[in-house]
Image (tube, rainbow, N blue to C red):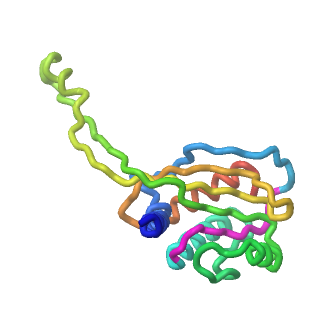
Amino acid sequence: MMKSITAVALRAWLLTLLLAGLAACASTASSWRSDYTGPAFKKVMVIGVSNDSAQRKSFEDALATALRARGVVAFPSYQALEDVGQIPIERVQKAIDANQADAVAVTRLKSIEPETMATMTEMPGFPGWYSTAWSGVPATTEVKTAVTVETTFWDAKTQKAIWRGTTKEIKGPDVQASIEELAGHIAGTLKSNGFI
């Protein structure tokens, strides 16, 4: 039973991880940064943690593209590590070294949970006692899926974490647009912190 729940969660991860949610809005829920003060990283290997190779490729391509758009050389890990699932760290390190990456961006699923979205309504022009009673009643409610992912940006040379951020997303209808929105948010955050 645990294995099937994990498989479902991992499949749902990239579909929803890669969704930029309601109004295509990605937001960093929390973040941490080290005291790193070195130069910006120039070559980044992107890893999307997933047992589904198609989902992994889709996310890795999007983040690598978003990083390249911000002036850094970036490549998806699946080009060097074609395996599905967890890959032995020795092989990951060989791929980092062979491609001369100086940084690694790793994104993984942190949680999937329902979130209720409510739209409020007002009744303008009606006497105060009645419209006031209705002012706090939602006109509509909708339950959507909220997905939280965690991205860690690693210095490949020292193998130390430089930045970690959790991003909360609300599942949206356009998968590809959502993937690109999420990837752009992550890449933009790395750029604004001076890491790339």
- Height in image: 159 above or below 138? below
Nearer the observer, 12 or 30: 12
Quadrant assignment for the N terminus: bottom left
Q: Position of residue 149 (x, y in %)?
A: 54, 55
**Is 137 positioned to the left or the right of 151 in the image?**
left
- Can you give x and y, in whole percent of width and height, for residue 27 in the image? 53, 48
Residue 161 covered by magenta stretch: no
Front position in the image: 32 or 195: 32
Location of residue 23 in the rendering, given as x and y in whole percent from the top left corner: 40, 53
Would you say residue 23 is visible in this rendering? Answer: no
For residue 98, above or below residue 173: below
Please give left or right for residue 21 compared with residue 71 in the image.
left
Tell me the residue at 80%/56% (across/down): 160
- Residue 161 visible within the image: yes
Q: Position of residue 66 (x, y in %)?
A: 62, 65
Residue depicted at 25% across the width and 28% down the height? 136
Q: Which residue is found at the position 54% from the left and 59% from the top? A: 109
Q: Residues in magenta?
A: 40-52
Residue 187, compared with residue 99, is above or below; it is above
Pick the quarter of the image with the C terminus. Answer: bottom right
Which one is nearer the viewer's eye here, 24 or 7? 7
Q: Is residue 21 left or right of residue 126?
A: right
User: Which residue is situated farthest in the front direction here?
Assistant: 1
Q: What's the residue at 22%, 31% (across, down)?
A: 137
* Viewer-closest of 1 and 179: 1
